[in-house]
Image: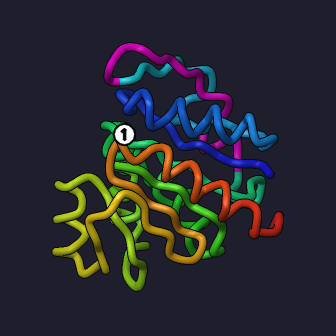
Amino acid sequence: MKIACVLGPMFEDSEFKDPYDALRSAGHEVTIVGLEAGAVLEGSKGKVKAKADKSFKDVKPNDFDALLIPGGSSPDKLRAHDEAVQFVKAFMTARKPVFAICHGPQLLLTADEYKGHRMTAWKTVLGDLQKAGADVVDQEVVVDGNLVTSRMPADIPSFIRESLKVLERAPAKR
């Protein structure tokens, strides 16, 4: 399957690299989508760098089967840009698989795509989602249909496992 990974500066290193590597190892094609094609993005821990393969202007949600939203400061930086928010919203409204970890659900909140979904997130984001009216729980991974969410780097193994299960049962929708 073709998976878009939305990525901005100061992403959480492991929340990008571990799922990215696992998805690729499972045979999926992962394209890093950022604000500027070719931009080199650095993780918040300074251990991982990634290059945006495409910009939001270069792609359409219909080009992809699923979406990965790593955490860290990346989601907060991306949600300030309408093209990123609309890109994420399109995956949710099309009911395509969406995998969001840690601060990733901030993009779902800005896209107004949290109502009626059960999810988890980093503790501060969890509070924001709860105040907005989302059905939130504090557990390592939550699967709600095609939406998979997790709280933090310690949850990555469960996040990857459940994301891959969702991809196994999801048909390519392009």
Please name the residue shown 25% across and 69% down the image.
129
Residue 108: x and y in percent read: 41, 63
Please name the residue shown 62% across and 21% down the image.
38
Residue 162: x and y in percent read: 57, 59
Q: Give residue 6's quadrant in the image.
A: top right
Residue 149: x and y in percent read: 44, 60
State how many labels appear: 1
Q: Establish if 64 lies above or below 7.
A: below
Q: Is residue 140 left or right of residue 84?
A: left
Q: Give residue 5's quadrant in the image.
A: top right
Q: Nearer the viewer, residue 82 or 63?
A: 63
Q: Is residue 29 left or right of residue 118?
A: right
User: Could you tell me which quadrant the C terminus lies in?
Assistant: bottom right
Write down the region rendered in magenta: 44-59
Residue, disc 1: 153
Q: Establish if 52 lies above or below 60.
A: above
Please name the residue shown 32% across and 63% down the image.
139
Q: Nearer the viewer, residue 99 or 153?
A: 153
Q: Find out whether residue 52 is within the magenta segment.
A: yes
Q: Is residue 127 left or right of residue 113?
A: left
